[in-house]
């Protein structure tokens, strides 16, 4: 595992605003099942593309609901891993750290990160499927989707489904953060899905330091000042340790 070159480490240590963009790779070491995992016996015969859509929920809300309750129980049993903890620890080392995540599992918050922009929503919340705007904490014990207290439509998980856009508030907050950051750490995401790729481009346009921590090279790699190849549960703690050693 290579370290950050000394010059870049100094630049990172001097940065005032760090933006961290994270994806599924950061939660992988916590055992969070991705959409690529087949799931257990009950759910193995379904394709996520056939469950995580507005059309699927309209057709069979209870089926989609039960699938999410299963995912919620799995995630409830998982814990933040060394990558989440390292990202949270960066707040002790740098003046301002914001996290933009494509993950819906809430593990950054549980690890202690205080500014988390959830690009794809949160599995721990429900929102009204009729779009009246009501949002509330999810109850993982319910067998059926609850009714909206305002308009009595079915409540649905407050996550972004296939074919849906990024919530405008999250998108705007992320774009603003990218425009003012002086370093961007992209961790555990291929970064190919828009608008995540735009964040890296925006940061690169004003010469922010761009560090990529990922197992594989990605389309963002040519933009990066440095690549930390390997498992983020190892490379990010190592990065924190190196920052900590700077006087
Ligand atoms: Zn409603």
Image (spheres, rainbow, N blue to C red):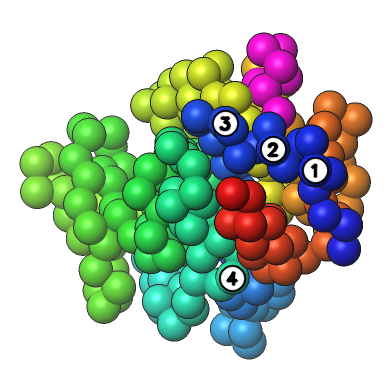
* Quadrant of the rendered image containing residue 46: bottom right
Residue density around tag 4, few if under 14, some if 14–19, many if 20 or more, within 10 Å: many
Q: Is mark 3 on a helix, strand or loop?
A: loop
The answer to whether marks 2 and 4 mark residues whose Cβ atoms lie closer than 8 Å is: no
Identify the mark nearer the N-term, 1 or 3.
Answer: 1
In front: 4, or 228?
Answer: 4
- Number of other residues with Cα within 10 Å of mark 2, as a class: few under 14, some 14 to 19, many 20 or more: few
Magenta range is: 203-209
Give x and y (percent) for residue 233. 68, 68
Query: Crowding near pointer 3: few (<14 within 10 Å), some, many (20+)?
Result: some
Q: Nearer the viewer, mark 1 or mark 3?
A: 1
For the N terminus, which image quadrant?
A: bottom right
Look at the image and say whether residue 243 sits in the magenta stretch: no
Left or right of 25 on screen, residue 30: left
Disc 1, ligand 1: is the CB inside 8 Å?
Answer: no
Q: Is residue 29 left or right of residue 211?
A: left
- Cβ–Cβ below 8 Å for labels 4 and 1? no
The kind of secondary structure element at disc 4 is helix
Q: Nearer the viewer, mark 4 or mark 1?
A: 1
| Mark-to-mark CA distance, 3 and 2 | 9 Å
The residue pinned by badge 1 equals: 6
Picture disc at residue 15: 3
Q: Position of residue 215 (x, y in %)?
A: 84, 58
Residue for badge 2 = 10
Mark 3 and mark 4: Cα distance apart in space: 23 Å
Q: Which of marks 3 and 4 is nearer the N terminus?
A: 3
Residue identified by numbered label 4: 82
Front residue (pair 184, 175):
184
Q: Do the residues labelled 3 and 2 touch (CB within 8 Å)?
A: no
Q: In this view, does 225 lie above or below 149?
A: above
Q: Is residue 44 left or right of residue 66?
A: right
């Amino acid at each position: 595992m290579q370290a950050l070159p000394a010059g870049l480490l100094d630049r990172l240590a001097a940065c005032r605003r760090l933006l961290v963009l994270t994806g599924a790779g950061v939660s992988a070491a916590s055992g969070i099942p991705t959409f690529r995992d087949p799931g257990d016996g009950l759910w193995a015969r379904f394709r996520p593309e056939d469950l995580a859509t507005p059309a699927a929920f309209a057709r069979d809300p209870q089926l989609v609901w039960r699938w999410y309750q299963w995912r919620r129980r799995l995630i409830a049993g998982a814990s933040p891993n060394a990558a989440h903890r390292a990202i949270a620890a960066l707040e002790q080392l740098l003046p301002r750290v914001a996290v933009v995540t494509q993950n819906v599992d809430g593990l950054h918050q549980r690890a202690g990160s205080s500014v988390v922009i959830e690009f794809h929503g949160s599995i721990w919340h429900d929102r009204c499927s009729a779009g009246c705007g009501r949002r509330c904490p999810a109850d993982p014990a319910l067998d059926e989707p609850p009714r909206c207290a305002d308009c009595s439509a079915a409540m649905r998980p407050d996550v972004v489904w296939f074919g849906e856009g990024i919530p405008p508030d999250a998108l705007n907050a992320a774009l603003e953060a990218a425009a003012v950051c002086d370093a961007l750490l992209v961790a555990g995401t291929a970064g190919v899905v828009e608008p995540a790729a735009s964040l890296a481009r925006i940061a690169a346009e004003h010469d922010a330091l761009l560090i990529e921590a990922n197992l594989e090279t990605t389309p963002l790699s040519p933009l990066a000042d440095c690549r930390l190849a390997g498992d983020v549960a190892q490379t990010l703690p190592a990065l924190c340790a190196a920052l900590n050693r700077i006087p």
